[in-house]
Image: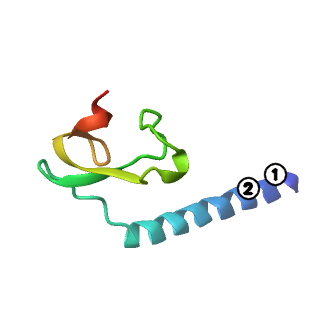
Amino acid sequence: MLDKAIHHEYRFMQDSFKYKKERWDKSHKPPDFKIGDLVLVSTLNFNNIKGPKKLKDPFAGPFMIKALHGPNAVQLELTGELMN
């Protein structure tokens, strides 16, 4: 009886994951970065920008994309304070 319930729950979870993935895939558009595009970089985790955290800009840039390393990974041409 317990095995049947566990199997039923497992099947229900798999169906739920499949449904969520289908909904996500239907509306999700992958980013289409190209070499030479200008992008902004989030400064949320930057420690090398001086000044009070409260007053720093949420984004730095724009920076030019030098190379693509994957759908969400790019190499940027950094300038100014961000080079260090």
Q: Amino acid at mark 1?
A: Asp
Residue 36 position in % (x across, y down): 11, 49
Residue 73 position in % (x across, y down): 30, 42
Q: What label sits on residue 51 in the rendered view? A: none
Q: What label sits on residue 3 in the rendered view? A: 1
Q: Amino acid at mark 2?
A: His
Against 13, residue 48 (above or below) is above
Against 30, residue 41 (above or below) is above
Neighbourhood count class around disc 1 (C-alpha, 10 Å): few under 14, some 14–19, many 20 upward: few
- Residue 5, by quadrant, is bottom right
Residue ID at (37%, 53%): 59
| Farthest left residue in view | 36
Q: Is residue 54 visible?
A: yes
Disc 2: which residue: 7
- Left or right for 68, reference 71: left
Residue 83 position in % (x across, y down): 27, 31
- Left or right for 20, reference 65: right
Against 69, residue 28 (above or below) is below
Viewport quadrant of the N terminus: bottom right
- Left or right for 60, reference 15: left
Mark 2–mark 1 contact, CB under 8 Å?
A: yes
- Residue 49, by quadrant, is top left
| Farthest right residue in view | 1
Q: Nearer the viewer, residue 70 or 23?
A: 70
Residue 67 position in % (x across, y down): 17, 39
Secondary structure of the residue carrying tag 1 is helix
Neighbourhood count class around disc 2 (C-alpha, 10 Å): few under 14, some 14–19, many 20 upward: few
Residue ID at (53%, 63%): 18
Secondary structure of the residue carrying tag 2 is helix
Residue ID at (81%, 51%): 3
